[in-house]
Amino acid sequence: MANAKHQTAVYAMLPFAEAVNKRTNGRVTMQFFYADQLGPRKEIYQSTANGVNDLGLYVTSDITGRLPLTETLQLPGLFASGELASTGGMRLAQSGLLDKEYNDTKLLGISSTSPNQLFTKKQVLSLTDLKGLKIRQPGGPAAEYWKAMGGVPVTLAATDLYNGLVSGLVDGTQLTIATSKVYNLQEVTKYVLLINLGQTSQPLVANLKTWNSFPKDVQDIIMDEAAKAMVNNGKGYDASDEEVATAYKTAGVVFNNPTNPQEWKTAIKPLIDKWVSDLAAKGLPAQQVYDKAAAAK
């Protein structure tokens, strides 16, 4: 969270802290440290495990490869909203399927951003329209998804996105609707295609020593309120998307659904199947995890 006004703080973490404090009659209080006050964002998970902080809300993609089953929640096409993605995350967190993955922290819950959508300068409704377009993406697996769909992936820092669109270096980008406002995309793109191309999961973990110091009744309260907070975080991202989308439509940005949603799903299915099979080959319950998450639709 960047600060106390960030939607995750407003919708999830501050209400979570207040509810836990109230229900435990003041036995548990929380102090939040924003941005990089306790260290770089990529170190949140490890700093929680090490006891630098008692709780940590981290971004799964910051430590790619360390918690592969959790990364399944970021696959494209799984969820149509942040609320559904967070509901799927909580379903997984409560299933026990991820317990071995979190052997050095206590997993309290998993929330998610809203899905990434496609912002373009020209209208795209089908894979035919997408073919050959240069699409900015952050790197990693997303590049393979765009290749599979016929686009030309271009790895570009978000800070260079505006100029990249103006210059023609890229024809479009994947981003959540709310995040796009940070980069003023409404000034340089005219179309948004709602294709739900993956989302960013945000698990909440506790230091094991801190967690084990709580009596059972306090642990139960924390788990109950954490589950609510995680889903509320997803709702917050959806609310932010809706607010920005309303402003964009007023400004003339056009929002579309694909003419044939199934063709997009068919194009990336082999990559999703490979993800699952690769993890299964390592002895991980990847298909169970995928199915459990997908059931939140």
Image (cartoon, rainbow, N blue to C red):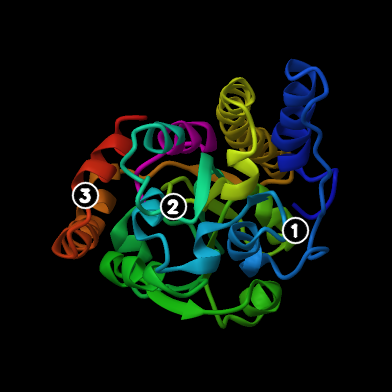
> Where the C terminus falls, by quadrant?
top left
Tag 1, which secondary structure?
helix
Where, by quadrant of the figure, is residue 218 drawn?
top right
> Taking 51 as reference, is 6 left or right?
right
Label 2 or label 1, whichever comes before in sequence order = 2
Residue annotated with mark 3 = 285
Q: Residue at x 63, y 79 (%)?
A: 164
Is disc 3 surrounded by few (<14), some (14 to 19) or many (20+) residues within 10 Å? some
User: Count of labels shown?
Assistant: 3
Specify whether residue 257 is in view. yes
Q: Is residue 238 or residue 253 the one in the foreground?
A: 238
Residue annotated with mark 2 = 102
Q: Residue 170's x, y, as percent? A: 54, 77
Comparing labels 1 and 3, the label whose residue is closer to the camera: 3
Where, by quadrant of the figure, is residue 99 drawn?
top left
| Marker disc for residue 182 | 1
Compared to residue 177, the image places residue 28 above or below, namely: above
Label 1 or label 3, whichever comes before in sequence order = 1
Label 2 or label 3, whichever comes before in sequence order = 2
Tag 3, which secondary structure?
loop
Q: Is residue 33 or residue 290 the one in the foreground?
A: 33
Tell me if residue 81 is in the magenta stretch: yes
